[in-house]
Image: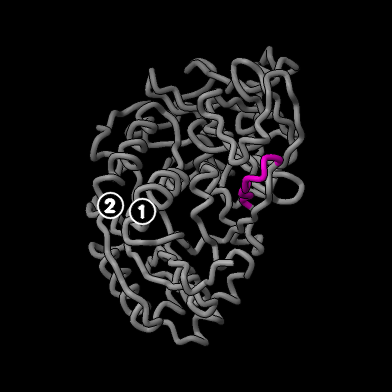
Amino acid sequence: MESKKSIKVAVGLSGGVDSSVAALLLKQQGYEVFALFMQNWHDTTGTLHGDCEWEEDLSVARMVARKLDIPFHFVDLSATYRQRVVDYMFSEYEKGRTPNPDVLCNREIKFDAFLHHALSLGADYVATGHYCQKEVLLGEDGKPIYRLIAGADGNKDQSYFLCQLSQEQLAKAMFPIGAIEKPEVRRLAREADLPSADKKDSQGICFVGKVDLPVFLQQKLAPKEGNVVEIFKEYYETASDQASTDLATLATPRTYEPRDGKVIGKHNGAQYYTIGQRKGLNIGGHVHPLFIIHIDMDRNVIYVGEGQDHPGLYRPALMILPEETHWVRPDLAMRVGETRDYWIRIRYRQPLQRGQLICREEGMYIRFDEAQRGITPGQFAAWYSDEGELVGSGVIHR
């Protein structure tokens, strides 16, 4: 059996506590570890945390590597990041869809461009500070099958962000902190006197940080004033398709006409908003908050409803196109006509929801046991087994 000392692992050291402890644990376990810091973003347009946040992260990452006595490398992947992640974001928002850049960042950057650079430096594996786990089993042909398992810390589980990884990517991945909980990670960092021990967790868009989204998107998507139309709950009492049982109908978002409601304000561009959004409308005069229930990109109209129990926020089903359906476990891929029960998540941190996957020629349908709030085209739906294994995912088409 291969000695750990002969296995070289590149840790994606971000300057945060999670990746720092990942490096610490790997070194303690006897692996040959080196740190690799990647810079993916230069532009500060729309960011909320100052001009040089990445430089602070770089400084902390260097100090952590020095403390752990491991080699430190730097790679600038900003051109690739802009092309594969940020340009995709702009394209999706322009269509009225809401992308998840963190999922794309893992698939296209951390476990692709970054992974290949690490391999060129002699790494056998890439390790990150994700709260998730990997298991290996042997297939019928004797070849390994890699399982992506939810992290032991249910409050921090990040398997959802890795829902687009392939077997080839998982084969080279290591998740050293996936089996422990966040408080223990902090404790280990303090015990080892790591410079990142008390550093706050990063927030916002992967490698960009927290942004004022409209300002960020205005780099490419010009403002365009339009109407905000409120749809009142009484509208649904006379709606004709409420009792439909047709799967395609259930998975189709309701559309509205301006005459169905009342104009209550203006917005600066429908492309800056997302289904289920509450903040940023700046419209008063209501007892309960307003939520966006539909976006009409052709007419540049945003439809809203009052209260988080508004019928327009809920839908019992969604649909994913065949070409946007991804199986982390290809050996478990469904055939047309097949139906399976899974646990499903349509956004990070959402509690798992029970539902059925129904495979048809036109795509994959997910019908939930209970109607879901804020099903958003462009986001990812991920499905899990009863054992907590993330089996597959797909981009919500509608």
Dot 1 and dot 2 residues touching (CB under 8 Å): yes
| Residue drawn at (44%, 60%) of the image | 124
| Residue drawn at (30%, 37%) of the image | 87
Q: Is residue 291 visible?
A: no
318 vs 50, nearest the viewer: 318
Residue type at numbered disc 2: Leu
Distance (Cα) linking label 1 and label 2: 8 Å
Residue type at numbered disc 1: Phe
How far from the left and from the top, in percent, is residue 26? 50, 73
| Residue drawn at (54%, 19%) of the image | 255
How far from the left and from the top, in percent, is residue 314? 65, 32
Q: In which quarter of the image is the C terminus?
A: top right
Q: Residue 77 carries which label?
A: 2
Q: Is label 1 in a helix, a strand or a loop?
A: helix
The numbered mark, 1 or 2, whose residue comes first in the sequence reads 2
Q: Is label 2 in a helix, a strand or a loop?
A: loop
Quadrant in the rendering for residue 328: top right
How far from the left and from the top, in percent, is residue 262? 49, 24
250 vs 29, nearest the viewer: 29
Give the labeled residue for mark 1: 114
How far from the left and from the top, in percent, is residue 152? 66, 63
| Residue drawn at (52%, 60%) of the image | 174
Q: What stretch is highlighted in magenta?
A: 140-148
Q: In the displayed structure, does residue 159 sit left or right of residue 277?
A: right
Q: Which mark is residue 272?
A: none
Q: Is residue 142 magenta?
A: yes
Q: In the displayed structure, does residue 277 sit left or right of residue 310?
A: left
212 vs 124, nearest the viewer: 124
116 vs 186: above or below: above
275 vs 65: above or below: above
Q: In which quarter of the image is the N terminus?
A: bottom right
264 vs 101, nearest the viewer: 101
